[in-house]
Image (cartoon, rainbow, N blue to C red):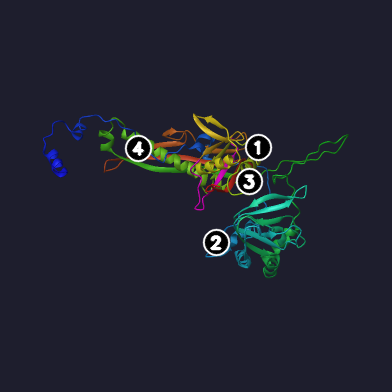
Amino acid sequence: MSVGEEIRSDQDRPQQSLGTSAARNLATTTKSAPQMQEISSRWLLRMLPWVQVQGGTYRVNRRTSYSVGDGRVTFVKTGDRVEVIPAELGELPVLRDFEDQEVLTELARRCQQREFEAGGVLTSFGNQADEVFLLAHGRAEKLGTGPYGDDTVLGTLADGAYFGEQALIDPETIWEYTVRAVTACTVLTLPRQDLEQVAERSESLRAHLEALRALPAQRTNNYGEAPIDLSAGHVGEAVLPATYVDYESRPREYELSVAQTVLRIHTRVADLYNQPMNQTEQQLRLTVEALKERQEHELINNREFGLLNNCEYDQRLQPHDGAPSPDDMDELLCRRRGSKLFLAHPRAISAFGRECNKRGLVPESIDVAGNRIPTWRGVPIFPCNKIPVTEERTTSIICMRTGEDEQGVIGLHQAGIPDEIEPSLSVRFMGISEQAIISYLVSTYYSAAVLVPDALGILENVEIGRWR
């Protein structure tokens, strides 16, 4: 008998027992609750101290500080041509608060594009400085001379940085450091001669530069704040200085943001299909999980209050060699007191682990809520998949001090809102439509505030794809 004839014989044979498909109609299956792959650990929401905000707004009062235009410069790229956005020239201290767009456009047009290979020297110590450099792409190091005559790395520059801005108004300026390209770099340069030529034809720019030169140097402490005059170490009846603490006249205010959705459930489903699990509860549970995921994403990435966008420029560091090394993590830690936690994409944590393996280091781990969390210098490194990874396979590592008493980073919410099921999260019944659909408004209110600039630091442009 052939195989085909044997199969047909089995099919023609009468069924002798109940089939499984029919049996399932009478059996009670064991079911799982609805699953959702989007759910993550959400360590930021769990570790951030939350402060109650009445009236929906939180004001951060600080001592007066003097901004020196220390932001980033943004560029646009067309083919191999790179241009600076005219308004972004206002980030330079020399052009801060200058708003004549026609003049800024002319200055942007005069910027000259230059390319440097890895290892190339952009500026040399001791030479006359007569132009400002805008780093459009690449990474460069500022080098100085150490106490024993060797080269010392003073800092690392990356996309959007600038240097030599004082050369635009002071013809006697010299380069006090050497800048060397670590990778291939694209820079734009604006010579002082071009600025002076534009100022000769522009009364507004000429007046701006003259007023800038006439301003007395601002007295500040090491953090850019208005100083408090003190006297110490004196003897006898010395005349003590008089002083006061000045506050910012326009402190920043954080308004609570909101994430919302309308959950719809048909009354037939809610009435008839509630065993063994309540359909409304399960729909609501997954909706709340999605809202919390979006909440953490906004706390990281929101343009107004997100951590990645609210870190001061002098608290943004570049890795020395691209990959996140123990040295880079130490540098990130030393920029602030009392660091409470790191936040990093899981792939960044893996890259840091590889760098530790190369040096024979084994980071300790601690138990946090039943989870083993790696640490560096005793500070836990929590995974956060909301930190973006670019197409170039680079990401950022966040380090922060938390708590209102520690002048750190805090979360903002308002507990006690109507129909609240969790602090600052409510589910409000909206009614039943003519199609017999029940609607619930699900809302969560939140924000984040950085109380002082050094509470938050970021290691940027971290390479996560290096395996050698």
**Label 1 vs label 4, nearer the camera:** 1
When asked about the image quadrant of residue 122, the answer is bottom right
The residue carrying mark 4 is 283
The residue carrying mark 3 is 315
Which residue shows up at 83% across the image and 36% down it?
233
Among numbered discs 1 and 2, the one appearing first in the sequence: 2
Secondary structure beneath dot 4 equals helix
Viewer-proximal residue among 101 and 191? 191
- Numbered mark located on residue 76 in the image: 2
**Label 4 vs label 3, nearer the camera:** 3
Among numbered discs 2 and 3, the one appearing first in the sequence: 2
The residue carrying mark 1 is 337
Q: Is residue 181 left or right of residue 287?
A: right
Viewer-proximal residue among 375 and 159? 375
Q: Is residue 393 magenta?
A: yes
- Label 1 and label 2: CA atoms lie apart by 37 Å
Which kind of residue does numbered mark 3 sit on? Answer: Gln
- Label 3 and label 1: CA atoms lie apart by 13 Å
Q: As displayed, is residue 95 above or below residue 249?
A: below
Viewer-proximal residue among 378 and 110? 378
